[in-house]
Amino acid sequence: MDALNNLGQGFSVAFDPMNLLFVFVGVVIGTAIGVLPGLGPTATIALLLPITYTMDPVGAVIMLAGIYYGSMYGGTITSVLLRLPGEAASVVTTFDGYQMTKQGRAGTALGISAVGSFIGGTVAIIGLTFLAPLLAKVAVAVGPAGYVAIMILGLFLVTSLGTGSTVKSLFMAGVGLLLSTVGQDPVTGTARFTFGQTSLLGGLDFVAIAMGLFGVGELLHSLERSEKGQAVTAKIKNIWPSRKDFRDSSGAIARGSVLGFFIGVLPGGGGVISSLASYAMEKRRAKDPSRFGKGAIEGVAGPETANNASSTSAFIPLLVLGIPSNVVLAMIYGALLLHGITPGPQLINEHPNVFWGVVASMYIGNLMLIILNIPLVGVFIQMLRVRTGILSTFALLVVMVGVFSINNNPFDMWVVLAFGVLGWIMIKAHFDPGPLVLAFILGPILEKSFRQTMLISEGSFGIFASDPVSATIFILIGLFIVYGFISRRRRQRRTRRAAAAGPEEGNTLVHASARREGTPDPGTEE
């Protein structure tokens, strides 16, 4: 009952006229940037961070959260109509969504995506409402050794569950940890890696790094692509799904809601992994898996539901444990820090209006999204006609003015430009900047917890084995490494057998393996 009472207070915060406006602005911006390929929620939130500095903290987080889950809706539109995912989590939707468009069922694909997203998001918000306070009570009892293990688990999962190279992700996480040490030592006060620059004594500014890597870096990369706007030629009709469509996709939506919720709670989990896992599950359960990749409605409903559920449940580790599950949430973490609010177990007790206000706003924002998306899909797709160069130039101007306005320090502008060029180079070299930013966020917490642990144990590492929380987490990490090693060896053996069997038999083995694992079969995507 406490949760319901607190939620009621949260609604009183969320129904404030200004907060309602921020919910609306957030979901509209989120849907719009989801539609525009290349300008995802990470870059957008990075660009808007300076603006939130002057806002009320509740309103700022409500708007940024709306952008995040709103982008999941918007990313579906171009995936279905143009086979062009507006957001990384919508890649899976292109497999069957675009095929439905070619069959004249674009409206149905968009409609079932909106309904599935609404149900998945709502299920996750209900889980967030009741599970987060319980988890916070447990997290309060965790000691410094447990926190060290939790931070390492977060970094480990982010680098190992990501979609890029594990080695490159580990390298970027190492760079992020190194950058987090720049500035004065928090205990001794000595300067570290400042090279005599007084501007670096306070450390590198998170906002400047995030805006450079994700904002400017992505803008530079987008300028290399086509300058022409995209035109949608497919006719959109019958957006509200039929009874048969609902019957065919109801199981996929139910399973996607639960699967997405639990994947979102994991550090490193997110929309991409949850949508892939949901697609694999639906294909594995299907009586005729060959329908997938040819316009199966379950292949659209399940992944879209899962990625919206995971984007909402990902707020649980952020708000309760202070661990951002992905880069977008790292940006929201940074926005809270800008307002002097540190996410963690004490957040619910110390800032109940922030926690419950944001949770209540999610119910409202989710409802706004389904109301906006179904009738206004035609308006959003017209945005594809805007030239990339115009958007990029305007966004770059906002970035430079915004970063200067935070501290009135020109040095921050140079940091943005330097990390912008670095971000562009990383995109070209296929290095994911996400682990760098996450490690930069978690680095100071990890250092503080580790030093506290060493003081308590008088320098003995045995405390990590004697502490039940840290011991359990390190055992889980060890099991995960062993499982990953065994899985890789199995894949290598299958590949060698397929190569030795010749082209035709080899393809048969590969397709059979894909069917067993439930992964998208290359031969059925066209």
Image (cartoon, helix red, strand yellow):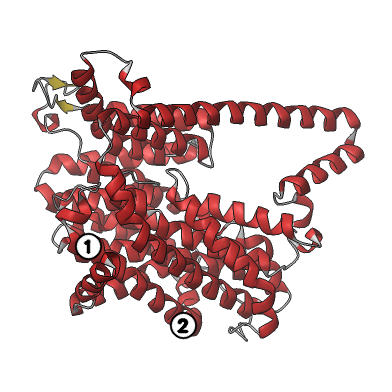
Q: Position of residue 116 (x, y in %)?
A: 54, 71
Of residue 516 and residue 380, the one placed in the foreground of this image is 516
Residue 417 appears anywhere in the view: yes
Of the 4 image quadrants, the one containing the C terminus is bottom right
Q: Are marks 2 and 1 in contact (CB under 8 Å)?
A: no
In whole angstroms, how far apart are the C-alphas of marks 2 and 1?
25 Å
Q: Position of residue 249 (x, y in %)?
A: 65, 72
Residue matched to label 2: 376
Of the 4 image quadrants, the one containing the N terminus is bottom left
Quadrant of residue 466 within the rendered picture: top left
Residue matched to label 1: 60
**Outermost residue toward the front in this view:** 1
Side of 520 relative to 151 (left or right): right
Q: Residue at x 51, y 57 (%)?
A: 260
Side of 315 relative to 269 (left or right): left
Label 2 or label 1, whichever comes before in sequence order: 1
Side of 122 relative to 78 (left or right): left
Of residue 491 and residue 386, the one placed in the foreground of this image is 491
Q: What's the residue type where badge 2 is placed?
A: Leu
Secondary structure under the numbered disc 1 in the rendered image: helix
Q: What's the residue type where badge 1 is placed?
A: Ala
Q: Residue at x 20, y 76 (%)?
A: 12
Q: Residue at x 20, y 27 (%)?
A: 182
Of residue 164 and residue 450, the one placed in the foreground of this image is 450
Quadrant of residue 96 within the rendered picture: bottom right
Secondary structure under the numbered disc 2 in the rendered image: helix
- Of badges 2 and 1, the one in the foreground is 1
Of residue 489 and residue 223, the one placed in the foreground of this image is 489
